[in-house]
């Protein structure tokens, strides 16, 4: 008896796919992924994970590349959509990132610890190979491993590969676009740590100012109330969020006016604290007035970001994060004889550390290889990010515009979305919770470029860093995030808590 070719093809697909097999056969297929082990990859037997707490049932595979780079791949059993989403971890990495959030949507997911464990602290800076793994190699090699595992499990190739990360994870995904443009079709880069050469000197300078005249939690409340009172209504909406902090200039928000007068002790700052606050807000410039490090934008001072970076932090054994930066730089510069971090000048000595930080830094604005392969890059950046101040992302976008030939040419493959009221990667009084995956996929696969993305604030009082420090909890609201350089403007009518009442202009 002869069968139609379509039926034969369908039977072949079912035989090849783990989805159509029995539970016992599927488990065996998952387990035997360890057979991918060779001199380059050490793969553990896969484990079948049942559906739980909204996470789809999946095959979980863990492995190691080059003895140190741990990675994890999760493979949905029933509804793979032929896509992969890789999560690049921020901060010091050292742990596996998200590998479950998109399983129910059909994505295979993957992540890596970038070659070291978080319990090591900054010890990996002392190991040349481990430092390069953290800088860029770990994500690249784990990406290759993940694609291999996915291909073997489904007996099929990934159609579209996506990656997302924020902070140092944002830096890692930018380096993927620049150094390994063939790895990914779409990239979500949140608040990238573009250059350690810029970030480290700035934080060392702030730490020295904070040591001399420390700001406190009460200081942040005072600054928050003052900036909000001065600038909240610039965008026409009283919501505790400064829509475009660049408009909150020093003639509108005058920090000097907060100095205690006539014996005041509450609701004001000492002259020294005002100087520290101004050091944080103002750009760090060289002797010719060139901006070396942009300052922090006004707004959301009491939302947790300032406190997380500037005050003693339990995650760092009671030391502030900015207080640990000097030790980090000392490790990075260990091969430079005579380097003394206490003598390091944050303005004049940047060239001294340039070569040592080069593996870590995004120093190219040429994204042409990534673009030419059809890649799409979606960047987002909080206006009130303390550590990774927004002007850095704006300046980088301008550099890409120049390299690509014009802003219009850049917008064909790279768009940035500024997030009012968002602190570092998440949190803050603004509408910051947004789905960046759906618009990126529609852009890459259907050519639908995103002009606005709807973000929401759920009205909760927790952030990813510290408890929200304002006195009252914000109510839920939504806002459009606009493709830079456009900003959201209230139409003058309609519900001010509804994104539909705002236009991008």
Image (cartoon, grey):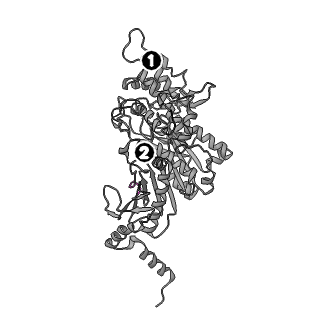
46 vs 260, nearest the viewer: 46
- What is the spatial separation of the Cα atoms under label 1 and label 2, in whole angstroms? 37 Å
Residue at image coords 43%, 26%: 224
Residue at image coords 37%, 45%: 118
- The number of discs equals 2
141 vs 38, nearest the viewer: 38
Q: Position of residue 270 (x, y in %)?
A: 42, 16
Residue 361 sits above or below residue 368 on the image: above
Task: Say what secondary structure mark 1 lies in.
Answer: helix
Pick whichever of labels 1 and 2 is earlier in the sequence: 2
Q: Position of residue 103 (x, y in %)?
A: 40, 58
Task: Say what secondary structure mark 2 lies in.
Answer: helix
Q: Position of residue 463 (x, y in %)?
A: 38, 39
Q: Which residues are magenta?
A: 98-102
Magenta-colored stretch includes residue 470: no
244 vs 311, nearest the viewer: 311
451 vs 53, nearest the viewer: 53
The residue carrying mark 1 is 272
Q: Position of residue 291 (x, y in %)?
A: 59, 30
Give the overall secondary structure of the magenta segment: loop
Circle on res. 124: 2
């Amino acid at each position: 008896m002869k069968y139609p070719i379509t039926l034969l093809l369908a039977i072949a697909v079912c035989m090849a796919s783990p989805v159509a097999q029995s539970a016992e056969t599927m488990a065996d297929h998952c387990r035997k992924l360890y057979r991918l082990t060779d001199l380059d990859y050490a793969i553990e037997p896969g484990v079948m994970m049942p559906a739980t707490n909204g996470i789809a049932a999946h095959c979980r595979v863990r492995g190691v590349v080059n003895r140190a780079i741990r990675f994890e791949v999760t493979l949905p059993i029933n509804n793979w959509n032929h896509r992969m989403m890789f999560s690049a971890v921020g901060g010091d990495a050292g742990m596996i990132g998200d590998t479950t959030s998109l399983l129910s949507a059909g994505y295979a997911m993957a992540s890596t610890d970038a070659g070291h464990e978080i319990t090591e602290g900054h010890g990996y800076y002392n190991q040349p190979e481990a430092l390069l793994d953290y800088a860029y190699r770990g994500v690249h090699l784990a990406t290759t491993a993940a694609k291999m595992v996915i291909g073997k499990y489904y007996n099929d190739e990934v159609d579209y590969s996506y990656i997302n990360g924020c902070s140092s994870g944002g830096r890692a995904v930018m380096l993927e676009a620049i150094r390994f443009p063939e790895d990914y079709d779409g990239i979500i880069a949140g608040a990238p740590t573009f250059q350690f050469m810029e970030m480290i000197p700035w934080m060392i300078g702030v730490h020295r100012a904070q040591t001399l005249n420390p700001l406190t939690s009460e200081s942040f409340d005072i600054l928050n109330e003052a900036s909000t009172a001065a600038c909240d209504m610039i965008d026409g909406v009283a919501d505790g969020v400064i829509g475009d902090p660049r408009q909150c200039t020093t003639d509108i928000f005058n920090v000097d006016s907060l100095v205690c007068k006539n014996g005041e002790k509450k609701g004001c700052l000492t002259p020294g604290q005002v100087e520290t606050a101004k050091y944080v807000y103002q750009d760090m410039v060289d002797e010719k007035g060139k901006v070396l490090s942009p300052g922090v934008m006004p707004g959301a001072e009491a939302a947790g970001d300032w406190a997380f970076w500037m005050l003693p932090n339990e995650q760092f054994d009671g030391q502030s994060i900015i207080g640990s930066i000097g030790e980090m730089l000392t490790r990075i510069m260990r091969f430079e004889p005579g380097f003394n971090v206490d003598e390091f000048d944050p303005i004049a000595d940047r060239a001294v550390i340039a070569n040592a930080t080069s593996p870590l830094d995004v120093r190219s604005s040429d994204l042409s290889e990534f673009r030419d392969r059809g890649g799409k890059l979606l960047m987002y950046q909080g206006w009130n990010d303390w550590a990774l101040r927004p002007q850095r992302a704006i300046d980088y976008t301008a550099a890409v515009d120049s390299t690509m030939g014009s802003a219009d040419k850049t917008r064909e493959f790279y768009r940035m979305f500024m997030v009012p009221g968002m602190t570092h990667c998440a949190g803050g009084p603004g509408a910051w919770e947004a789905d960046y995956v759906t618009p990126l996929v529609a852009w890459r696969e259907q050519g639908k470029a995103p002009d606005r993305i709807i973000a929401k604030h759920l009205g909760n009082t927790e952030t990813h860093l510290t408890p929200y420090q304002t006195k009252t909890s914000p109510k839920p609201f939504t806002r459009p995030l606009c493709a830079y350089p456009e900003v959201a403007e209230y139409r003058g009518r309609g519900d001010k808590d509804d994104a539909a009442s705002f236009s991008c202009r």
